[in-house]
Image (spheres, rainbow, N blue to C red):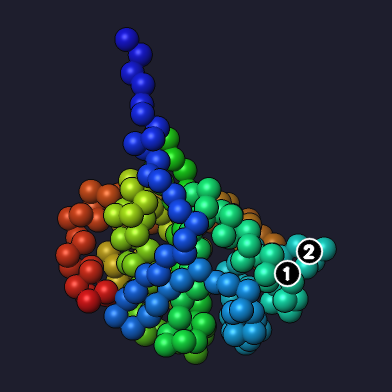
Amino acid sequence: RKRTFDMTLRHPSRSSAPARLDGRRITMRPLAAGDFRAWSEVRAHNEEWLTTWEPRRNPSLPDPTVERSAFSARCAQRDRDRTVGIAYQFGLFIGDQVAGEVNLNNVIRGAMQSGTIGYWIDQRHAGHGYVAEGVVALIRYAFETLGLHRVEICIVPRNTKSRRVMEKLAIRDEGIAQRYLEINGKWEDHIRYGMTAEEWHALDGELINTWLG
């Protein structure tokens, strides 16, 4: 007899209430319209530092780094994504200052139960392990709250600073995906790093003690 799945068990109940995630030194929460000035300042200060590693923005679309209404629309879309369970995106704060983002995108349920993590950090705060804290907090949320089975992080091979985060956390290198994503106008190879729920539960005590406290 054909096997069937109870999808209500494969997709935990969702809430539009924003989550707050904490590390030892950082806090993460969904960005809101009131964060525009702080977020846009960080993005403007880091434009060259960041755009090297990001998809090229469509110039015909409003720019959320300079237009408050576009930033508010971006926040509203992310709220909708969280409500329907397809993405969970967080501003990373050091004290009360916006310092970056750590996001869980492309959440797929059904038989796959996976999502993709991406992150960026203000260059002024790079190299201090803040992103590693944020990634561990988000991985914990993905496995223990959302009930996912796998997360992946995809990084351009020459982006040694982002790859260093994976090395610190001992996240498994799954090899190269050729011309995987468009980055700054060019199709770039990416190293795919992955972690399963089984791997998380084997390491969670060590990672939580080291990075979250």
Residue 198 appears in the picture as rendered: yes
In the rendered view, tell whether residue 92 sits above or below residue 189. Answer: below
| Three-letter code, disc 2 | Leu
Quarter in which the C terminus is drawn: bottom left
Residue labelled with disc 1 = 70
Name the residue rendered at 27%, 74% in the picture: 212
Q: Secondary structure at mark 2?
A: loop
199 or 170: nearer the viewer: 199
Q: Position of residue 98 (x, y in %)?
A: 51, 82
Name the residue rendered at 41%, 54% in the picture: 152
In the rendered view, tell whether residue 95 sits above or below residue 16. Answer: below
Identify the residue at the far right of this view: 60
Left-right relation of 123 to 72: left
| Three-letter code, disc 1 | Ala
Callout 1 crowding tier (Cα within 10 Å): few <14, some 14–19, many ≥20: some
Q: Position of residue 138 (x, y in %)?
A: 37, 63
Image quadrant in which you'd find residue 144? bottom left
Identify the residue at the far top of this view: 1
Q: CA distance from mark 1 to mark 2?
A: 9 Å
Q: Secondary structure at mark 1?
A: helix
As drawn, the label of residue 61 is 2
159 or 97: nearer the viewer: 97
Left-right relation of 57 to 107: right
